[in-house]
């Protein structure tokens, strides 16, 4: 499944990060995952939301610059080696993994996010993954 990942760049102060989160919350946007990395005086916030169109509207209305990319979300059984199995399938199809992280885990299933160089092809490759 494809989802839209947002990257928002703000000043590295925790207050700036909090401000972005509050703007999304006030706009009714629920975060499904978030990561923050500080680098050279800025904070880079990557997030997935329950409603990417609403998130884009809220960020634009608040005049917050952002970029997006399509990422794959793969749900598999919670067993050892599942991430490697997905990565191998993508690599065998000639795709390059640009980023990956765990989205959720409930003891029975795990959801991984993969950013690849061709998301649509990646979606086709992973159509039968379990």
Image (spheres, rainbow, N blue to C red):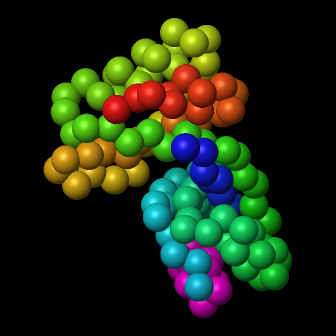
Q: Can residue 99 be found in the magenta stretch?
A: no
> Left or right: 68 with respect to 3?
right
| Residue 59: image location, x then y, percent | 74, 74
At x 81% / y 82%, what residue is drawn? 61
Identify which residue is drawn at 60% across, 45% down: 2
Could you tell whether 119 is left or right of 80 in the image? right
Q: Quadrant of the N terminus?
A: top right
In terms of image quadrants, where is residue 52? Answer: bottom right
Examine the image and state in which quarter residue 64 appears: bottom right
Residue 22 counted in the magenta span: yes
x and y, in percent, of residue 35 in the image: 48, 57
Q: Is residue 35 above or below residue 86?
A: below
Residue lying furthest bottom in this view?
Answer: 26
Predominant SS along the magenta part: helix
Assign the C terminus to one quadrant of the image.
top left
* First to last magenta residue range: 13-27
| Residue 3, image x, y percentages | 60, 51
The residue shown at (34%, 53%) is 104
Q: Give left or right: position of 89 versus 70.
A: left
Nearest the viewer among 97 and 15 is 97
Residue 28 x/y as whole percent:
59, 85
């Amino acid at each position: 499944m494809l989802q839209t990942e947002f990257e928002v760049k703000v000043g590295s102060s925790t207050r700036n990060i909090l401000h972005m989160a509050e703007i999304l919350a006030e706009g009714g946007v629920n975060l499904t995952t978030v990561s923050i990395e500080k680098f050279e005086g800025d904070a880079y916030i990557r997030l997935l939301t329950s409603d990417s169109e609403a998130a884009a509207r809220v960020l634009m209305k608040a005049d917050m610059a952002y970029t997006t990319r399509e990422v794959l979300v793969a749900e598999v059984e919670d067993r050892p080696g599942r991430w490697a199995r997905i990565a191998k399938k993508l690599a065998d199809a000639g795709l390059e993994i640009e980023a990956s992280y765990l989205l959720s885990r409930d003891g029975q299933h795990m959801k991984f996010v993969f950013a690849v160089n061709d998301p649509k092809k990646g979606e086709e490759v992973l159509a039968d993954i379990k």
